Amino acid sequence: MVGDSLGTKLISLGHKVMMGSRTADNEKAIEWTNRNGAHASNGTFADAAAFGEIVFNCTSGKVSLEALQLAGRENLQGKILVDVANPLDFSNGMPPSLTISNTDSLGEVIQRQFTDVKVIKALNTVNCQLMVNPGALKDPGNIFICGNDAGAKAEVENLIRSFGWEKIIDLGDISAARGTEQLLPLWVRLMGKLGTPMFNFSIVQ
Amino acid sequence: MVGDSLGTKLISLGHKVMMGSRTADNEKAIEWTNRNGAHASNGTFADAAAFGEIVFNCTSGKVSLEALQLAGRENLQGKILVDVANPLDFSNGMPPSLTISNTDSLGEVIQRQFTDVKVIKALNTVNCQLMVNPGALKDPGNIFICGNDAGAKAEVENLIRSFGWEKIIDLGDISAARGTEQLLPLWVRLMGKLGTPMFNFSIVQ
């Protein structure tokens, strides 16, 4: 779902997008490709990582590291990896817990395991529809970004801006992912309370 | 600091307040009493717990359980305990981690250890000056409340409303404290980024 939303938006903005899956014949990926025209294609995680100049990790946080191993270190090397995943664990029912938290984060683990990749944590605090369409809310609120490489962060910030986000807050290095990932337990509670995933946080002063 | 802010506000609203400390001759508590007139007094944690109809836990989250043990089970029995504390651990420097998190929270631990007490988690997502003066922000944003006892929650909600808070979100039972306590890592990052603790979160839709 997250990959579908982001891929479709990127295509609509004129980018070429390859959707990666565990296997090259993933039905949903083929359907997505057919729906998105000549700039859309699909393949394995490794195919997509080799294809992309910027790679998005849109997998479930619990399996992100496995997916990135399949994508291949050599295919990711030197590239920007936008990590929009959250390490949510629903295996014990609701509310979900986090598989990584407090003194570490998924963003940091990925950065440590892929030292040659420029990991940028972004967009993980909103629902995937809102990620690519902040205008769906009367007040879109803030979106958070963090990562160690300033140049990569600026590039991702431009991309997010092209999605329609205006109030982007740079929280600093990748360790700030602890903050945005640990926002999810409150996010999940609020979704239950509000009865919709279409909401966001706005920082007020 | 948190007890001073809340106590002073409660006095200004016409309540009688006893400030509890580890010892009855705590200098800051005496100074607070002298500053706040006839409705203010101070004593031990046990004195304050016995005195209050509603008890506020304004201690540092790391020592809250110890302070509540000193307050005494018999003095707290049947009462509302408003838990505004966060289990922040600064012992390894910045950024702080949480001593309890993810699958548990300070609010829940207190509720489990004091089963006869009506624990209401509230106000822990804002700085203590803002707790009692939401009007200090152009847009005060939202304040969160949770707890197992609906009657106690309504009473605390009224109290918070008397502080000036209008947009109060009831997140449900005390396990929602996981959400509000785990907001703190992001809060601390934002404080560093914004250069001030005078900000809040507003839920936008």
Image: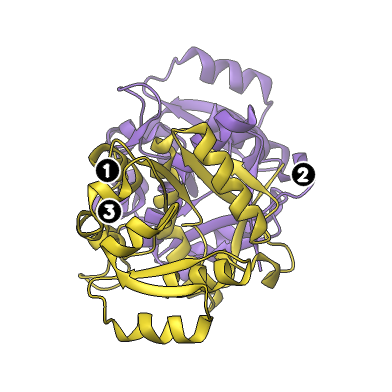
Chain colours: A yellow, B purple
Task: Report if residue B82 is visible in the image.
Answer: no
Q: Amino acid at mark 1?
A: Val
Q: Are marks 3 and 1 on the same chain?
A: no
The image shows residue B109 at horizontal and vertical percentages of: 27, 50
Would you place residue A78 above or below residue A96 in this image? Answer: above
- Distance from label 2 to label 1 (Cα)? 41 Å
Front one among A96 and A158: A158
Q: Which residue is mark 3?
A: B104
Chain letter of disc 1 in the image:
A
State the CA–CA distance, disc 3 to disc 1: 23 Å
Label 3: element kind: loop
At x 39% / y 36%, what residue is drawn? Answer: A175
| Relative vertical location of residue A60 with respect to residue A1 in this rendering, above or below | above
Instruction: Estimate the x, y position of residue B74 in percent, counting from the top left.
Output: 29, 46
Residue bearing mark 1: A109
Q: Give the camera-side residue of B113 and A36.
A: A36
The answer to which of A64 and B156 lies nearer the viewer is A64
Residue A154's x, y, as percent? 58, 40
Q: Quadrant of the N terminus of chain B?
A: top right
The foreground one among B201 and A18 is A18
Secondary element at image label 2: helix
**Neighbourhood count class around disc 2 (C-alpha, 10 Å): few under 14, some 14–19, many 20 upward:** some
Three-letter amino acid code at the position of disc 3: Asp
Q: Nearer the viewer, mark 3 or mark 1?
A: 1
| Residue bearing the label numbered 2 | B135
Read off the chain for label 3.
B
Amino acid tagged 2 = Gly
Labelled pair 2, 1 in contact (Cβ < 8 Å): no
Question: In the picture shown, does residue B64 fall above or below B120?
Answer: above
- Residue sitting at x 26%, y 37%: A112
